[in-house]
Amino acid sequence: MSHTELRQSSISIKRSGVHRIIQVVVLLCIQAAVLFAAAGTLNWLRAWAYIGMSVALLMVNMVVLFRVNPEVINQRGKIKSDTKKFDKVISVMCAPLPFIMLVIAGFDAVRFQWSSMSGSLAIVGVAVLVSAQFLFLWAMAVNVYFETSVRIQKDRDQHVVASGPYQFVRHPGYVGFILMHVGTPLFLGSWWAFVPVFLMVILVVIRTALEDLTLHNELPGYTEYAHNVRYRLLPGVW
Protein backbone atom coordinates (compact mmCIF):
# COMPACT_ATOMS: atom_id res chain seq x y z
CA MET A 1 0.00 0.00 0.00
CA SER A 2 1.40 3.42 -0.98
CA HIS A 3 1.94 6.39 1.34
CA THR A 4 -1.08 8.12 -0.21
CA GLU A 5 -3.29 5.05 0.22
CA LEU A 6 -2.28 4.76 3.87
CA ARG A 7 -3.18 8.36 4.51
CA GLN A 8 -6.51 8.11 2.67
CA SER A 9 -7.70 4.88 4.28
CA SER A 10 -9.37 6.66 7.21
CA ILE A 11 -10.43 9.87 5.42
CA SER A 12 -13.95 10.67 4.26
CA ILE A 13 -15.68 13.65 2.70
CA LYS A 14 -16.07 16.49 5.20
CA ARG A 15 -18.12 19.68 5.15
CA SER A 16 -15.48 21.50 3.11
CA GLY A 17 -15.59 18.67 0.57
CA VAL A 18 -19.37 18.97 0.30
CA HIS A 19 -18.95 22.71 -0.22
CA ARG A 20 -16.47 22.02 -3.02
CA ILE A 21 -18.85 19.63 -4.76
CA ILE A 22 -21.66 22.20 -4.50
CA GLN A 23 -19.34 24.88 -5.92
CA VAL A 24 -18.53 22.73 -8.95
CA VAL A 25 -22.19 21.84 -9.58
CA VAL A 26 -23.24 25.49 -9.32
CA LEU A 27 -20.40 26.43 -11.67
CA LEU A 28 -21.67 23.93 -14.24
CA CYS A 29 -25.17 25.41 -13.99
CA ILE A 30 -23.79 28.92 -14.49
CA GLN A 31 -21.77 27.75 -17.49
CA ALA A 32 -24.89 26.26 -19.05
CA ALA A 33 -26.85 29.46 -18.45
CA VAL A 34 -24.06 31.58 -19.96
CA LEU A 35 -23.80 29.39 -23.05
CA PHE A 36 -27.49 29.39 -23.87
CA ALA A 37 -27.96 33.07 -22.99
CA ALA A 38 -25.10 34.03 -25.30
CA ALA A 39 -26.49 31.83 -28.08
CA GLY A 40 -29.98 33.27 -27.58
CA THR A 41 -31.56 29.85 -27.89
CA LEU A 42 -31.83 26.48 -26.21
CA ASN A 43 -31.70 24.81 -29.61
CA TRP A 44 -27.94 24.26 -29.62
CA LEU A 45 -27.06 20.59 -29.71
CA ARG A 46 -23.34 21.02 -29.13
CA ALA A 47 -23.94 23.07 -25.99
CA TRP A 48 -26.23 20.37 -24.60
CA ALA A 49 -23.62 17.75 -25.48
CA TYR A 50 -20.89 19.85 -23.85
CA ILE A 51 -22.86 20.21 -20.62
CA GLY A 52 -23.79 16.53 -20.66
CA MET A 53 -20.17 15.50 -21.16
CA SER A 54 -19.07 17.86 -18.38
CA VAL A 55 -21.59 16.30 -15.98
CA ALA A 56 -20.51 12.78 -16.94
CA LEU A 57 -16.82 13.59 -16.47
CA LEU A 58 -17.57 15.26 -13.14
CA MET A 59 -19.33 12.12 -11.94
CA VAL A 60 -16.36 9.98 -12.98
CA ASN A 61 -14.01 12.34 -11.14
CA MET A 62 -16.09 12.21 -7.98
CA VAL A 63 -16.37 8.42 -7.99
CA VAL A 64 -12.61 8.00 -8.46
CA LEU A 65 -11.62 10.62 -5.90
CA PHE A 66 -14.11 9.36 -3.32
CA ARG A 67 -12.34 6.03 -3.61
CA VAL A 68 -8.66 6.94 -3.86
CA ASN A 69 -8.15 10.49 -2.56
CA PRO A 70 -11.17 12.10 -0.84
CA GLU A 71 -8.94 14.45 1.13
CA VAL A 72 -8.10 16.39 -2.03
CA ILE A 73 -11.80 17.29 -2.34
CA ASN A 74 -11.91 18.41 1.29
CA GLN A 75 -8.84 20.61 0.89
CA ARG A 76 -10.00 22.13 -2.40
CA GLY A 77 -13.14 23.30 -0.62
CA LYS A 78 -11.19 25.35 1.94
CA ILE A 79 -10.05 28.97 1.71
CA LYS A 80 -6.36 29.25 2.55
CA SER A 81 -5.09 32.35 4.34
CA ASP A 82 -1.45 31.82 3.34
CA THR A 83 -1.99 31.79 -0.43
CA LYS A 84 0.85 33.53 -2.25
CA LYS A 85 0.06 37.12 -3.31
CA PHE A 86 0.95 36.50 -6.95
CA ASP A 87 -1.55 33.65 -7.05
CA LYS A 88 -4.33 35.86 -5.70
CA VAL A 89 -3.66 38.43 -8.44
CA ILE A 90 -3.48 35.86 -11.24
CA SER A 91 -6.60 34.08 -9.99
CA VAL A 92 -8.60 37.33 -10.09
CA MET A 93 -7.35 38.05 -13.61
CA CYS A 94 -8.08 34.53 -14.83
CA ALA A 95 -11.49 34.00 -13.18
CA PRO A 96 -13.69 35.80 -15.76
CA LEU A 97 -11.91 34.41 -18.82
CA PRO A 98 -13.64 30.98 -18.96
CA PHE A 99 -17.02 32.73 -18.88
CA ILE A 100 -15.91 35.21 -21.55
CA MET A 101 -14.85 32.20 -23.63
CA LEU A 102 -18.35 30.71 -23.34
CA VAL A 103 -20.05 34.03 -24.16
CA ILE A 104 -17.92 34.46 -27.27
CA ALA A 105 -18.56 30.83 -28.27
CA GLY A 106 -22.32 31.39 -28.04
CA PHE A 107 -22.11 34.62 -30.03
CA ASP A 108 -19.76 33.18 -32.64
CA ALA A 109 -21.09 29.66 -33.18
CA VAL A 110 -24.82 30.43 -32.99
CA ARG A 111 -26.09 33.98 -32.55
CA PHE A 112 -23.90 35.95 -34.98
CA GLN A 113 -21.87 33.20 -36.68
CA TRP A 114 -18.76 35.33 -37.02
CA SER A 115 -16.55 32.42 -38.06
CA SER A 116 -16.92 28.96 -39.54
CA MET A 117 -15.25 25.86 -38.11
CA SER A 118 -15.26 22.39 -39.62
CA GLY A 119 -17.57 20.00 -37.81
CA SER A 120 -14.82 17.38 -37.76
CA LEU A 121 -12.90 19.52 -35.26
CA ALA A 122 -15.63 18.79 -32.72
CA ILE A 123 -14.30 15.23 -32.59
CA VAL A 124 -10.84 16.62 -31.89
CA GLY A 125 -12.41 18.77 -29.20
CA VAL A 126 -13.95 15.74 -27.51
CA ALA A 127 -10.60 13.93 -27.54
CA VAL A 128 -8.83 16.96 -26.07
CA LEU A 129 -11.49 17.48 -23.38
CA VAL A 130 -11.48 13.84 -22.29
CA SER A 131 -7.66 13.76 -22.27
CA ALA A 132 -7.61 16.96 -20.21
CA GLN A 133 -10.02 15.57 -17.64
CA PHE A 134 -8.09 12.31 -17.43
CA LEU A 135 -4.81 14.14 -16.81
CA PHE A 136 -6.42 16.47 -14.25
CA LEU A 137 -8.01 13.53 -12.45
CA TRP A 138 -4.79 11.52 -12.51
CA ALA A 139 -2.92 14.42 -10.91
CA MET A 140 -5.56 14.81 -8.18
CA ALA A 141 -5.69 11.07 -7.55
CA VAL A 142 -1.99 10.77 -6.74
CA ASN A 143 -1.37 14.15 -5.13
CA VAL A 144 -3.05 14.76 -1.77
CA TYR A 145 -1.56 18.29 -1.84
CA PHE A 146 -3.43 19.26 -5.04
CA GLU A 147 -5.13 22.43 -3.77
CA THR A 148 -6.71 25.36 -5.59
CA SER A 149 -4.11 27.92 -4.53
CA VAL A 150 -0.34 28.26 -4.46
CA ARG A 151 1.14 27.90 -0.98
CA ILE A 152 3.60 25.76 0.93
CA GLN A 153 1.42 23.44 2.99
CA LYS A 154 3.46 23.35 6.20
CA ASP A 155 0.27 22.59 8.13
CA ARG A 156 -0.04 19.34 6.17
CA ASP A 157 3.63 18.28 6.15
CA GLN A 158 3.82 18.74 2.38
CA HIS A 159 6.42 16.74 0.50
CA VAL A 160 7.28 16.30 -3.17
CA VAL A 161 4.98 14.02 -5.20
CA ALA A 162 6.81 12.32 -8.07
CA SER A 163 4.39 9.55 -9.06
CA GLY A 164 1.65 9.40 -11.69
CA PRO A 165 1.82 12.24 -14.23
CA TYR A 166 4.37 14.03 -12.04
CA GLN A 167 7.02 11.69 -13.38
CA PHE A 168 6.59 13.29 -16.83
CA VAL A 169 6.00 17.00 -16.10
CA ARG A 170 6.15 18.98 -12.87
CA HIS A 171 2.74 20.66 -13.22
CA PRO A 172 0.35 18.21 -14.93
CA GLY A 173 -2.72 19.89 -13.41
CA TYR A 174 -1.99 23.05 -15.37
CA VAL A 175 -1.51 21.02 -18.53
CA GLY A 176 -4.97 19.55 -17.98
CA PHE A 177 -6.41 23.03 -17.34
CA ILE A 178 -4.94 24.37 -20.58
CA LEU A 179 -6.13 21.41 -22.63
CA MET A 180 -9.60 21.69 -21.11
CA HIS A 181 -9.95 25.24 -22.40
CA VAL A 182 -8.35 24.50 -25.76
CA GLY A 183 -10.82 21.66 -26.33
CA THR A 184 -13.90 23.74 -25.48
CA PRO A 185 -13.85 26.13 -28.50
CA LEU A 186 -13.07 23.18 -30.78
CA PHE A 187 -16.07 21.26 -29.48
CA LEU A 188 -18.42 24.25 -29.54
CA GLY A 189 -17.23 25.38 -32.98
CA SER A 190 -15.82 28.86 -32.34
CA TRP A 191 -12.51 30.28 -33.50
CA TRP A 192 -13.06 33.60 -31.71
CA ALA A 193 -13.40 31.82 -28.36
CA PHE A 194 -9.67 31.11 -28.58
CA VAL A 195 -8.93 34.77 -27.78
CA PRO A 196 -9.69 34.46 -24.03
CA VAL A 197 -8.15 30.98 -24.11
CA PHE A 198 -4.90 32.51 -25.34
CA LEU A 199 -4.98 34.98 -22.45
CA MET A 200 -5.65 32.13 -20.01
CA VAL A 201 -2.67 30.19 -21.33
CA ILE A 202 -0.41 33.21 -20.79
CA LEU A 203 -1.62 33.58 -17.20
CA VAL A 204 -1.23 29.86 -16.50
CA VAL A 205 2.33 29.89 -17.84
CA ILE A 206 3.14 32.86 -15.60
CA ARG A 207 1.52 31.14 -12.61
CA THR A 208 3.44 27.94 -13.36
CA ALA A 209 6.76 29.80 -13.50
CA LEU A 210 6.10 31.61 -10.21
CA GLU A 211 4.81 28.50 -8.46
CA ASP A 212 7.79 26.50 -9.67
CA LEU A 213 10.15 29.16 -8.31
CA THR A 214 8.27 29.11 -4.99
CA LEU A 215 8.60 25.34 -4.73
CA HIS A 216 12.31 25.50 -5.57
CA ASN A 217 12.87 28.04 -2.80
CA GLU A 218 10.56 26.71 -0.09
CA LEU A 219 9.74 23.00 -0.53
CA PRO A 220 12.48 20.59 0.59
CA GLY A 221 13.41 18.08 -2.09
CA TYR A 222 11.81 19.97 -4.98
CA THR A 223 15.09 21.07 -6.56
CA GLU A 224 16.27 17.44 -6.69
CA TYR A 225 12.91 16.43 -8.17
CA ALA A 226 13.23 19.16 -10.80
CA HIS A 227 16.62 17.76 -11.81
CA ASN A 228 14.95 14.41 -12.53
CA VAL A 229 11.78 15.81 -14.14
CA ARG A 230 13.12 18.61 -16.30
CA TYR A 231 9.97 20.06 -17.83
CA ARG A 232 7.24 22.11 -16.22
CA LEU A 233 4.40 21.77 -18.75
CA LEU A 234 5.52 20.51 -22.14
CA PRO A 235 8.09 17.71 -22.43
CA GLY A 236 11.01 18.70 -24.59
CA VAL A 237 10.05 22.39 -24.60
CA TRP A 238 9.52 23.92 -21.13
Image: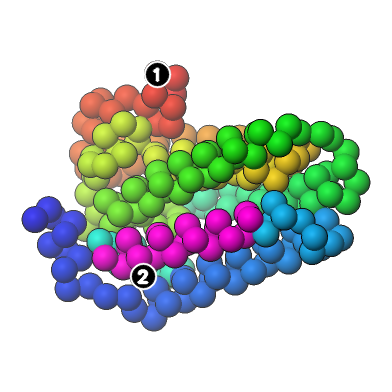
Q: Quadrant of residue 120?
A: top right
Of the numbered discs 1 and 2, the one sitting upstream in the chain is 2
Residue at image position (38%, 52%) is: 137
Contact, mark 1 vs mark 2 (Cβ under 8 Å): no
Q: Residue furthest left?
A: 1
* Residue 228, position as x, y percentages in the image: 23, 26
Residue at image position (46%, 70%) is: 20
Q: Residue furthest bottom?
A: 15
Badge number at residue 74: 2
Question: Is disc 2 placed on a helix, strand or loop?
Answer: helix
Residue 21 horizontal side relative to residue 6, left or right:
right
* Residue 79, position as x, y percentages in the image: 46, 68
Residue type at the position of mark 1: Gly
Mark 1 Cα within 10 Å, few/some/many (few <14, many 20+)? few
- Vertical placement of residue 74 versus 140, above or below: below
Badge number at residue 236: 1
Main SS category, magenta section: helix
Q: Quadrant of the N terminus?
A: bottom left
Residue 196 horizontal side relative to residue 55, left or right:
right
Residue at image position (21%, 31%) is: 224
**Which residues are the magenta region?**
49-67
